[in-house]
Image: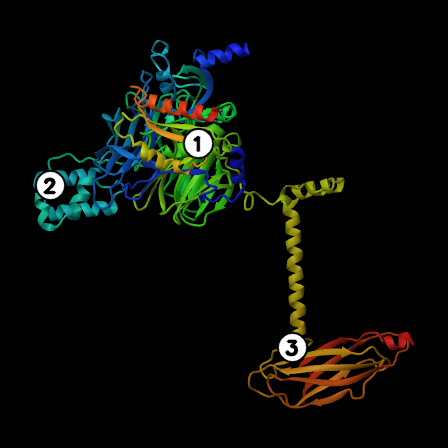
Amino acid sequence: MAAASGSDCGRRRPESNDAGSKWLDAHYDPVANIHTFSSCLALADLHGDGEFKLVVGDFGPGGQQPRLKVLKGPTVLTESPLPALPAAAATFLMEQHEPRTPALALASGPCVYVYKNLRPYFKFSLPPLPPNPLEQDVWNQAKEDRIDPLTLKEMLEDIREKAEVPLSVQSLKFLQLELSEMEAFVNQHKSKPIKRQTVITTMTTVKKNLADEDAISCLVLGTESKELLVLDPEAFTVLSKMSLPSVPVFLEVSGQFDVEFRLAAACRNGTVYILRRDSKHPKYCIELSAQPVGLVRVHKILVVGTTQDSLQGFTHKGKKLWTVPMPAAILTMSLLEQRSRGLHAVMVGLANGEVRIYHDKALLNVIRAPDAVTSLCFGRYGREDNTLIMTTRGGSLIIKILKRTAVFAEWGGEAGPPPAQSTKLNMPRKTRLYVDQTLREREAGTAMHRAFQTDLYLLRLRAARAYVQALESSLNPVSASAREPLKLHAVVQGLGPTFKLTLHLQNTSTARPIVGLLVCFLYNEGLYALPCAFFKVPLLVPGLNYPLETFVESLSDKGSSDVIKVLVLREGQSAPLLSAHINMPASEGLAAA
Amino acid sequence: MGLLDRLSGLLGLKKKEVHVLCLGLDNSGKTTIINKLKPTNAQSQDIVPTIGFSIEKFKSSSLSFTVFDMSGQGRYRNLWEHYYKEGQAIIFVIDSSDRLRMVVAKEELDTLLNHPDIKHRRIPILFFANKMDLRDAVTSVKVSQLLCLENIKDKPWHICASDAIRGEGLQEGVDWLQDQIQAVKT
C-alpha cells in the first residue's frame, strides 16, 4: 500500500506540497549562518563511524572570517577559521590502509589544505609562476635606493599597462597605497624576492586506478593561470599538468586517472573544454551562447546551466542534445544520485526559490524553498542515504530526506518531442532518374549554378528593359511624372452584351489639381460600340477618386472578345500620359441566347 | 493433549506464546533491546546490524514472547509489512539522539499505522525512546511529541525511556506489554 501511494503521488504534478511530497522536512534552521556554494559542500564519513558528516567551506559574510565547518546532524561539530575564501571542498581516500577514513581537501587561495580525522595533515601550495623580469628589475632598483617610491609607482603602472605577464601581488598592493604609506611599504618589502602566485578556482577528484566506490582518488585542481593539475593522493606531487585557453570554473571528471579519463572544464570564456588522458590540450570544445553557471555530468551527458536561464545537455564529444528553459536565473546545480533506484538527476537551484529536479529534459520534482537556494548537496548524511542539503542566500540550512517509498515519475506535458516527429514518412523509392540527376548535380554543380545565374541575370535584364520601355511609352496605368501624377484603374461589370466600363482616375499629387485631361478609347469597331469614345475629364482634385462610367456594347455574335485600350492624354500633346489595356470578357448573354 | 495443555496453563507451568514485532530505524537499538531481554546466559556479546530479520525468544513472568527482530535498514523495511498479520504486539524502537531522522521514524510509523493489516486492529504498541544515555538524546515526552503519538486513538500505546546497553527501562515496558496482551486475551 505504501508503494502504491508513492507511485500515486508520482503521477501528480511534481510540486512539493505537504500531502503528496516526496520529501520529509528533517531540519530547517533559518539562522544557521551558512553562506556557501555547492562546490564548497561535501559529505563524508570523516571519522569512520558510519555517521556521515557535512563539510562546509563557509564564506563568512560581511567581513567575517571564512570558516571550515563540520556538521553532524543538525549541529555544528567543529569550526575552524580559514586564511582565505574557500574555492572548493572535496573528500577522497588517500591510501589503502585501514581504517579507510576519507581525507578532506579544502582549496583556498593558492593552497589545498588536507585534513585527516579533522586534523590538519598536509598543505599543498601551487608552484609559483615566473615573475615579470621588468618588474623584478624595477624592484631591484628600489632595493638599491636608486629610485624613489613615486618613480617606482610610475614604472610599475607602466608595466601593468603594457606587459603580458601580470604583476605580482606585492606590486599590486603597492599601487593601491596612498603617497604617505609608500615609503614604509617599500622599505618593508624591497628586500623580499618577488613571487607571482596563482590561485585555485575549482577542485574535484578522480579515481586513480580502480572504479570502486572506496578506491583512492587524485585531486584535480583548476587554477587562475588557465591550468589543470592532477595531484598524487599520497605524495601530493603534480602527476599531470594540462593547459586550457581560459580559466576553468567548473570541473567534471569521469574514468580513472591511470587508465582513461575524460575531463570537462567549463571556463570563464563561455566554453566547455573536454580533455582526455594523454592530451595536454582540449580535445573537444563546446561553445556556449552564454556564461556557464553550473556543470554536472549524468552518466555520459554533460548538463550545463547558463546565464540565459537554460539547461543544456551535451554528449561527451560536444554534440548538443537538448535545451530546457528555466523560469528564473540558475544559481547552482548539483547531481542527485539515488542509488537504491539507480536514478541520476540534476538538481537546479533557481533565483525564485525553487529547486527543480530534471532527468534529462523531464522535470521530476519541484521543491519550494523559503529563499533562493545557493548551494545543494545530495547524498548520505548521518545514517540516511537520500538526504538533500540546501543552504540559502540568507544563510539558512534546510535538510530534507527523500521518502523511502518516493518514486520519481516523469511528468508528461512539456517533456519530449511531439509524437509526429517520430512517425516515419512514407518516402517514395529512389528512381533511376533521380539517382542520375543527383549524380549529375553532384558532378556539374558549379556549371549548373553558373547557367542558372546567367539565365537569371538575363531575365532580370529583360524585365528591366520592358519596364523602362513601358515607362517611356506611358503604357502603365500609373504616371509618376512630376506634373501629372495620376493613377488609373478600370473595372468591367456586366455579363453582356452590354458591359459597364468604369475608369477610376485619381490625382495622387499632394496639393496640385490637374485640368485639361482627355480620355480616349481605342477598340475594334467591328466588335464593340461605345457611345462616346473620346471625352474630357473634369478638374481632378488631389486625393479624390473620380469614377468615369461608359457603356460598351458587344457587337459580335460569336462570343469573341478583344482588348480595349484606354489612353489618358493631355490637351495638345499626342503622347499619352497613361494607358491601360482592358481585357474584355466574352459576352455570355449572347452565348446563352 | 488438550486437557494436559489447559491444566499446565492453569498451573502456570506452560506459558502462553505471543508473537511480537520489533520495528524501528536502523541503529536504533532493536537487537540490543531484545538481547538484553533474553536470559543472561543466552545473551550475545557483540551486536551486528541485522540482515533481513531474526527470530528471538524470551519469557516474562506469565508470557512467552517470540520476537521478530526486523532489520531497520532502508532496503529491508519493505519486509516489515509481511509480518504485520502474525504480530500480536509491536515494539517500536526510536533512537532519541538522532534528531534528524525523527521524521523518518514518524513516516515509517504512519505507514505502519495506516497499513490494512494494522489499521483496524486494537494491537498494543510499545515505544522505546532508546539511547537515553547519550548526551544529545531528547526526552521521551519530546519523542512522543515529535512522532505525534497523541494522534493514536484506537490502539493502546506506551512510551518508555530506555537505555538498552544497561537495560534501564526495558522491564517497565515489557510489563506494560504483558498486561495489555493479557487484557486483550481475556
Residue that badge 3 annotates: A478
Q: Which of A169 and B160 lies nearest the eye of the viewer?
A: B160
Question: Mark 1 = which residue?
Answer: B108
Drawn side of residue A235 relative to residue B1, left or right: left
Amino acid on which the number 1 mark rests in the picture: Glu
Check chain identity for marks 2 and 3: say if they share one: yes
CA distance for labels 2 and 3? 86 Å
Q: Residue A428: image x %, image y %? A: 74, 42
Of mark 2 and mark 3, the one earlier in the sequence is 2
Q: What separation in Å lies between label 1 and label 3 (alpha carbons)?
A: 88 Å
Provide the residue designation for mark 2: A142
Task: Note whether residue B148 is visible.
Answer: no
Residue extending farthest to the right is A593
Is residue B169 at least partly visible in the picture? yes
Q: Secondary structure at mark 1?
A: helix
Pointers 1 and 2 within a single chain: no
| Horizontal arrangement in the rendering, residue A378 relative to residue A549 (left or right) | left
Q: What is the secondary structure assignment of the residue under circle 3?
A: strand
Judged left or right of residue A236, residue A298 is right
Q: Position of residue A180 (x, y in %)?
A: 8, 49
Amino acid under disc 3: Val
Amino acid at pointer 2:
Ala
Q: Nearer the viewer, residue A318 or A350?
A: A350
Q: Quadrant of residue A590?
A: bottom right
Q: Chain of mark 1?
A: B
